[in-house]
Amino acid sequence: MKLLRVGPAGAERPAALDPDGILRDLSGLVPDIDGTLLADDSALSRIRSALAGDQLPVLDAAGLRTGPPVGRIGKVVCIGLNYRDHAQEAGAAIPEEPLVFMKAPDTVVGPQDTVLVPRGSVKMDWEVELAIVIGQTARYLESHEQARAAIAGYTITHDVSEREFMLERGGQWDKGKNCETFNPLGPWLVTADEIPDPQALGLRLWVNGELKQDGSTAEQIFPVVEVVRYLSQFMVLRPGDIINTGTPAGVANGQPYPKPFLRAGDVVDLEIDGLGRQRQQLKPA
């Protein structure tokens, strides 16, 4: 299934794309697409049946905003340097264990929402990433099979970063990762059954129409199931949590000088095979 949330920010309604790609209203069936829904197999089965039976009202998509596909996100966990080519362009050693940092849930916005350039920003960067959406509580998982069972599905995430704040202003990466609007998410939550091999997905990102990133999840150092298993040793993963799994090579910070960091007025497009497409315009904060 392709689940999404549409409408004004803070007042989104649950929706889905039917097998013909028609937008259907789920608000008469479930209150929202969030951790409560994702952990409820019976509710998900009702949605599948309603979609298959052509029982849901059609929504007019014209002019309708697409919000983040998951509501009431508990936490956003991120993996750094998880692609071999990205580690190489950063001049970093291949990590022996996943590098973990966090983004606040309130950084999450819709896939076509405006991204704000922070005041004082001079090194704002792009990162297209595969996001895992957790569907079952996961703690101390022992196997990749258990990790796979905890995954509700996948979506696209744009892990926007400010490299000066992140790398040159002291402390950890948080200052460059948690600026307002720095995590566009969506457009869809694609359930795991529709993505049989998350390690075979192409990822691409353009800035002002110029292709900047063109990679594959096959190049991940730590694959999806290992990321989930590993994280569960250090924190409880709960339904509706998001995991950003890292970005391939091609970020601005990996380019020769003068590095082409983002500026107000730029337009970023990004896509992942089977998961849809995002577009954001940058404006001053």
Image (cartoon, rainbow, N blue to C red):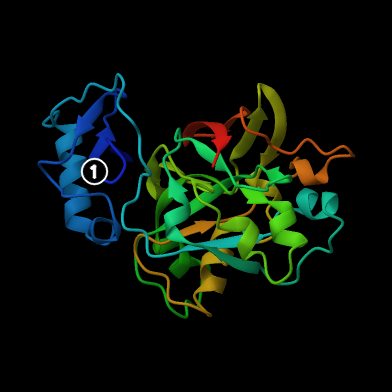
- Looking at the picture, tell me which residue is in the foreground, 5 or 3: 5
List the residue tagged with mark 1.
11
| Residue depicted at x 44% and y 50% | 108
Instruction: Confirm whether residue 88 shows in the render.
Output: yes
Please tell me whether residue 66 is drawn above or below residue 147 in the rendered image: above
Q: Is residue 24 left or right of residue 112?
A: left
**Residue 272, horizontal then vertical, whole percent:** 55, 36
User: Which amino acid type is shown beneath numbered disc 1?
Assistant: Ala
- Looking at the picture, tell me which residue is in the foreground, 3 or 31: 31
Q: Is residue 147 left or right of residue 64?
A: right
Q: Quadrant of the C terminus?
A: top right
Residue extending farthest top: 62
Q: Secondary structure at mark 1?
A: loop
**Residue 212, horizontal then vertical, whole percent:** 72, 32
Q: Quadrant of the N terminus?
A: top left
Q: Residues within 10 Å of mark 1 (few under 14, many from 20)?
A: few
| Residue depicted at x 63% and y 53% | 246
